[in-house]
């Protein structure tokens, strides 16, 4: 347990002073006032938007991760039951065109194992995911040089680009998540299928925090444009295309392009409507998940009322994933906090934690929100949540 957990404002002040910049100059570089930045640094005002964090990181010539801060050591009993060493080894020491020297079980068995991992991820059961994925990925690498090559490459894009990046990001392992996304891209290059190339692009786009403006995220619109002529009536292709449009919307919002964000989100909603919500949809693309994204985009645009309207329109039962239901609770909490509805925000955060604790505990914006709420509404429920996150 740390005695003095750092806030985002503390990190901004340290980075600004290291660069030898004044409050006035730094604020001017991002088009903000000196008073606004002073309040941020002193914890009197919380950064609500990823676009502001990205702009500050650029002005101070540091990564956004440095401003957000790495997750502090936490009391996480699950880490006693699993290790990421095997995942790290298979991602760093092997690749789709450089398989490990191991025997591989039949491709259909590995498909079943990957489905088990995917279902575990939807339940936020990271212990099972981390136990299954390394062996599955290693054996799929082996199949890339045999008669099942194309099937193995598709499954690798799912294993590394979807399940791998999501799991590692939620566990706070963003660098390893990026490598997992890169392995998916390599598999897609070998497959040479525009739809699967798009699927791999989505995984890479979300391996790192969007506040870093990672190139893979910021080029999501181009990836969607490239895929669009190949979509047709194929459901999977439409799901991939829709998720890339949502990624493009987030990229626009991070860049402060609210109109572009709305246009891309509207296109995703148009694609999702006739598909409906299916538990088998890739990345759960459908009207409900689009609603979660629209909630988040409205929060980023500084429109909490609009965000809550979107959130209220989503039927959580239509989201066949604890992670996505937790994401909805997280964004609703952020919107309530922007209105000063502290008790409602705490209620939503506790619900999110029950659904996907690691996702909440390793979310830098939520860590900062909770630290801020502690100064305003330090009730028992909030103190318990803060303690589990090493913030109190």
Image (tube, rainbow, N blue to C red):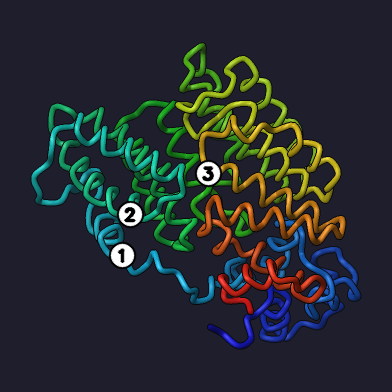
On screen, residue 32 versus residue 277, left or right, reads right
Residue under the image location 87 percent in, 66 percent down: 32
Q: Which residue is mark 2?
A: 130
The mark nearer the N terminus, 1 or 3, is 1
* Circle 1 Cα neighbour tier, 10 Å, few/some/many (<14 / 14–19 / ≥20): few
Check if mark 3's residue and mark 2's residue have beta carbons within 8 Å. no
Label for residue 322? 3
Residue under pointer 1: 83
Camera-nearest residue between 81 and 224: 81
Whether residue 179 is situated above or below residue 71 in the rendered picture: above
Q: Position of residue 66 (x, y in %)?
A: 59, 72
Q: Nearer the viewer, residue 328 or 156?
A: 328
Say which of 298 and 98 sits in front.
Answer: 298
| Rendered view: 154 above or below 170 | above
Asked whether disc 1 touches disc 2, contact meaning CB atoms under 8 Å apart, the reply is: yes
The secondary structure type at the circle numbered 3 is helix
**Rendering coords of residue 329 (x, y %):** 67, 48
Picture coordinates of residue 43, whole percent (x, y): 79, 77
As drawn, which residue projects farthest toward the top? 233
In front: mark 1 or mark 3? 3
């Amino acid at each position: 347990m740390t005695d003095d957990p750092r806030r985002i404002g503390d990190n901004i002040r340290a980075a600004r002073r290291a660069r030898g910049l004044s409050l006035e100059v730094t604020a001017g570089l991002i088009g903000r006032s000196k008073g606004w930045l002073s309040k941020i640094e002193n914890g009197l005002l919380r950064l609500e938007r990823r676009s502001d964090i990205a702009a500050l990181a650029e002005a101070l010539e540091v990564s956004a991760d440095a401003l957000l801060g790495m997750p502090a050591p936490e009391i996480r009993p699950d880490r006693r039951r699993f290790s990421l060493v095997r995942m790290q080894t298979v991602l760093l020491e092997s690749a789709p065109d450089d398989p490990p020297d191991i025997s591989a079980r039949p491709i259909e068995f590995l498909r079943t194992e990957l489905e088990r991992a995917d279902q575990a991820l939807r339940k936020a059961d990271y212990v099972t995911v981390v136990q299954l994925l390394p062996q599955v990925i290693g054996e799929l690498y082996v199949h890339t040089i045999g008669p099942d090559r194309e099937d193995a490459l598709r499954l690798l894009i799912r294993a590394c680009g979807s399940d791998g990046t999501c799991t590692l990001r939620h566990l706070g392992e963003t660098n390893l998540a990026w490598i997992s996304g890169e392995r998916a891209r390599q598999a897609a290059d070998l497959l040479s299928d525009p739809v699967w190339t798009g699927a791999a692009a989505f995984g890479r786009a979300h391996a790192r925090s969007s506040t870093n403006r990672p190139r893979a995220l910021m080029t999501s619109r181009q990836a969607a444009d490239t895929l669009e002529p190949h979509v047709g009536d194929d459901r999977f292709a439409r799901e991939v295309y829709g998720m890339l449009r949502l990624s493009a919307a987030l990229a626009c919002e991070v860049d402060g392009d609210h109109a572009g964000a709305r246009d891309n989100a509207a296109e995703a909603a148009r694609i999702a409507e006739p598909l409906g919500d299916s538990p088998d949809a890739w990345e759960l693309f459908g009207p409900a998940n689009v609603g979660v994204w629209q909630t988040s985009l409205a929060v980023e645009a500084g429109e909490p009322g609009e965000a809550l309207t979107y959130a209220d329109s989503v039927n959580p039962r239509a989201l066949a994933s604890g992670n996505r239901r937790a994401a909805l609770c997280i964004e609703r909490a952020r919107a309530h906090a922007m209105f000063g509805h502290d008790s409602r925000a705490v209620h939503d955060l506790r619900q999110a934690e029950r659904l996907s604790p690691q996702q909440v505990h390793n979310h830098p914006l939520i860590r900062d929100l909770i630290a801020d709420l502690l100064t305003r509404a330090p009730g028992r429920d909030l103190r318990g949540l803060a303690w589990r996150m090493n913030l109190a």
